Image: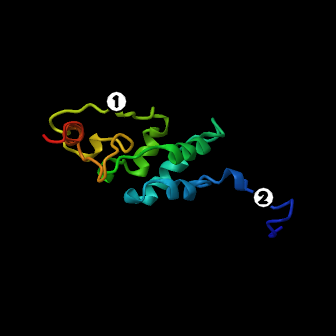
Amino acid sequence: MDDPSSPDYPHDQDVDDDPLAGFEAFWALYPTGRHQAKKDAQKAWTQIKAGIDPQLRERILEHLRTRKWPREVCYVPLASTFLRGARYDDEPVTADAIPITPANRWMPSAVPEDWCHHEPRCNSRDWHAMKVKVDQEGSV
């Protein structure tokens, strides 16, 4: 009766029902600059209702594989916040969706990764506009 491989052994839960199943893959895919509060992230992972949607955890992992994160880690939520807020259901942010304001116009995150072709890459839209003008006219 003490042998877990025995059919008479009382199994509380299957291996498939492990509440932390897939968490290490999630943690490995999450941006490394935000690998803090792992226990809180594990707790949030176990609270995901995978029984309602069996593919939910796989969808979360796929979202992490394809999501473009801001370069500044301070704008990446902690993993527990990402999970509890269901941020994996967010629509992807496009370059047009980033409003440019006087407060953020010089921030590197205001220029999406694939937006500038200069080397080194422009760190603001104003700087990029100036470089384009120089490229076209030869001077400012």
Q: Nearer the viewer, residue 33 or 123?
A: 123
- Please name which of the two marks, 2 or 1, marks the residue nearer to the observer: 1
Q: Earlier in the sequence, mark 2 or mark 1?
A: 2
| Picture residue at 29% right of the left edge, 44% below the top | 109
| Picture residue at 51% right of the left edge, 47% below the top | 64
Q: What element does badge 1 sit on?
A: helix
Which residue is labeled 1 in the image?
A: 97
* In the image: residue 80, left or right of residue 134: right
| Picture residue at 57% right of the left edge, 44% below the top | 62
Q: Quadrant of residue 137?
A: top left
Q: Residue lying at the far bottom in this picture: please name it.
A: 2
Q: What's the residue type where badge 1 is placed?
A: Ala
Which residue is labeled 2 in the image?
A: 10
Residue 40, position in %: x, y? 43, 55
Q: What's the residue type where badge 2 is placed?
A: Pro
Q: What element does badge 2 sit on?
A: loop
Residue 83, position in %: x, y? 46, 44
Residue 5, position in %: x, y? 83, 65
What quarter of the picture does the C terminus occupy? top left
**Height in image: 44 above or below 130?**
below
Distance from label 2 to label 1 (Cα)? 54 Å
* In the image: residue 67, left or right of residue 133: right
Q: Nearer the viewer, residue 44 or 82?
A: 82
**Height in image: 137 above or below 80?**
above
